[in-house]
Amino acid sequence: PAIELDGVVKEYIAHGEVVQAVKGVSLEIGEGEFFSMLGPSGCGKTTTMRMIAGFEDPSRGTVRLHGQDVTDVPPNKRDVNMVFQSYALFPHMNVWENVAFGLRRKRVPDQEIKRRVGEMLEIVDLTGRERRRPREMSGGQQQRVALARALVNEPRALLLDEPLGALDLKLRQAMQIELKRIQREVGITFVYVTHDQNEALTMSDRIAVMNDGLVEQLAGPREIYERPATKFVAGFIGTSNLLSGTVDQVGDGTATLRYGEGGRVIVPVDGGASAGGDVEVTVRPEKIRISADEPPGDVSAVRGTVAEVVYLGTYNSYSVDLAGGTEFTVFEQNARDSSITAERGDSVWLWWQPQHSY
Ligand code: ADP
Ligand code: MG
């Protein structure tokens, strides 16, 4: 692996009390991987990143880069570079000088500087803007200069802490695609910190979802979304519907619960469940179908009343009060004829395939 964290803890003393910013993180990041750390503000992402870069010393645990224990190695001796949200460009230098700065300081020969800076500006698509100063450029362009400046040093890993946070949504989405392309092109390990789930899902090979100083789940985007390991992950990534009930019947790999009037929910179980036990079931809004007629017998189905219908362009969002007392959200892709399946006040069935709940 390119980066290994082994039982890493970071404690601060604040107002005479010990605060654990990172409570014990162990993970491995593969060479050439686009790896994201995703979680709400204050969950310990930046602190973890700064320990990888060497700006913070762990209170306990080990940091290894490319197999070598670097826990006590200073930042400038580690083969990683960091890009910040604020870009931190030199305002009095033009694009070329900003990117060449590190190489000049290392006394790299002029010819080589010329070649490497030229190559890098091409990769970030800034060829022809060499003489611009940072203030003459858009936020997205400045971010690309910061990226080129970090990459021109040819680090084995690049650490990016919410690098797109200052950009507006359109530009941020364009830069997400761009960053992924650049990472593929240069082929080095990217460690990306964000609180934005869409950003992490768009770009990452794997994501560590963090909460309160710990990693709750580490997996690929699809698995994180389709199979959240904890209630926190299910709630943080996308929208989830949660329903709880008592198991009525246990079958072959499934448990069935009765829910409200005429409702039944079938959930896949791996042992564990027994009749009379309490279970919680999570279903994503886009997995649910809405209909006036009773659905087939082999799916999960519950009854409810439509409380709200919101037209959102590419899809419709329904809020449905279930007979069992819970409120469910259902997303329905807008068909070509843009018809709405149910109106406010309608009595409806919500149904989904058992394998789409967990
Ligand atoms: P994130 O980047 O996920 O928003 P941080 O790693 O910045 O989270 O912070 C995690 C927790 O550690 C927060 O509760 C924060 O207040 C605390 N913290 C971070 N740095 C310090 C510090 N230098 N002194 C005291 N507490 C800190
Ligand atoms: Mg942070």
Image (cartoon, rainbow, N blue to C red):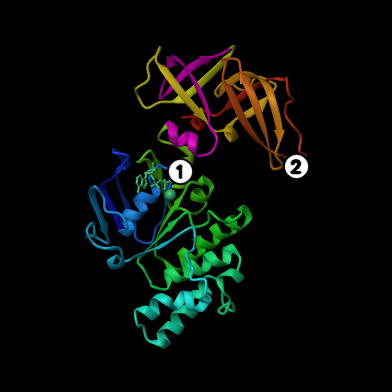
Question: Which residue occupies the foreground of this view, 109 or 55?
Answer: 55
**Rendered position, 181 above or below 314:** below
Disc 2 to disc 1, how far (Cα)? 40 Å
- The residue under label 1 is 41
The amino acid marked with disc number 1 is: Ser
Judging by the rendered image, the residue that carries numbered circle 2 is: 336
C-beta proximity under 8 Å, tags 2 and 1: no
Chain part drawn in magenta = 231-260
The kind of secondary structure element at disc 2 is: loop
Q: Is residue 97 left or right of residue 154?
A: right
Please name whichever residue, 195 or 14, is drawn nearer the observer in this view of the structure: 14
The CB of the residue at mark 1 lies under 8 Å from ligand 1 = yes
Above or below, 93 relative to 67: below
Ligand 1: which quarter?
Answer: top left
Amino acid at pointer 2: Arg
- Image coords of residue 56 (percent x, y): 30, 54
Residue 234, given in percent of the width and then of the height, sits at 47, 34
266 shown above or below 160: above
Label 1, residues with CA under 10 Å away: few <14, some 14-19, many ≥20: few
- Asked whether 202 falls inside the magenta stretch, the response is no
Q: Quadrant of residue 158?
A: bottom left
All told, the count of numbered labels is 2
Give the quadrant of the N terminus.
bottom left
Q: Residues within 10 Å of mark 2 (few under 14, many from 20)?
A: few
On the image, the x and y values in percent for residue 76 come to 30, 67
Label annotation for residue 71? none
Residue at far front of view: 15
Identify whether 60 is placed above or below 255: below
Residue at figure coordinates x 44%, y 79% from the top left? 116
Element marked by disc 1: loop
Residue 235 among magenta residues: yes
Residue at position x 57%, y 63% in the image = 140
